[in-house]
Amino acid sequence: MLFETICIQNGSIQHLSYHQSRFDASRAALFGSDLKRLDLGTLIKPPAGSGTLKCRIVYDRQIKEISYTPYTPRRIRSVKLVDSAIDYDHKFSDREAIEELLGMRGSADEILIVRDGLVTDTSIANIAFYNGRSWVTPKSPLLRGTTRERLIRSGFLVPRDIRVDEIRRFERFALMNAMIGFEPIENGIIVE
């Protein structure tokens, strides 16, 4: 099973085309390209009201469940570097391996997964670093997030390999996902 998380703001579905693209690509890669296309825009029926909702779509060949829950962001200020050879190129519902890594965070709020000496992602978000001129993001993330993709296409983010030994040179970092958008972390701490 896979899932897609989509932000709904005051009844409006955010950045649907990016979610539709990833949904279509994952279904084609894992179940074959001959599947009937499912239009998320016609299937998502946000409840009336204001505020921020998290729409979660669970699927494989077909959609199994669509749910809506109020969203409260987690406060993240510190991340701990964790080495792993984990592979998570599709947004799988089974996140046991990621949860095991998250259990290694100690007193940090979150983890930053390092694979082959290169920075990838946190357990819940892509990451970017500010070098004083531009924001750079790992060229090879664990998961190609929809917000990351949108910001790369706009020219705001520059993808490149980021080695662990260079992260101390950056001025700050930001986390990004469909629910939080792009969030610079002021006075963020990276724990080795």
Image: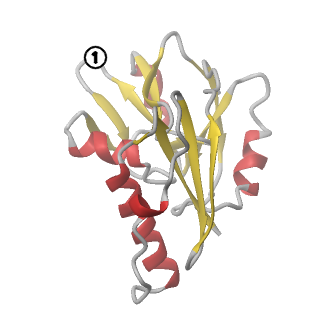
Across and down, in percent, residue 131 comes to 31, 22
Can residue 10 be seen in this snapshot?
yes
Q: Residue 142's spot in the image, x, y percent?
A: 51, 53
Q: Kindly state the secondary structure of the residue where label 1 is placed.
A: loop
Q: Quadrant of residue 77?
A: top right
Extreme residue toward the bottom, this view: 34
Horizontal side of residue 108 vs 18, given as left or right: right
Residue under the point 47% across and 21% down: 168
Front-most of residues 80 and 163: 80
Residue that badge 1 annotates: 132
Q: Position of residue 139 (x, y in %)?
A: 36, 48
Q: Height in image: 122 above or below 92?
A: above
Q: In this rendering, would 46 be left or right of 158?
A: right
Q: How many marks?
A: 1
Query: What residue is shown at x 48% (from left), y 75% (from top)?
Result: 27
172 versus 153 height, above or below? above
Q: Can you say whether 125 is above or below 145 in the image?
A: above
Q: Residues within 10 Å of mark 1 (few under 14, many from 20)?
A: few
From the image, which quarter does the N terminus lie in?
bottom right
Residue located at (65% from left, 45% from top) = 83
Q: Please tell me which residue is depicted at 63% across the width and 27% down the height of the picture.
A: 72
Q: Indicate the amino acid at tag 1.
A: Gly
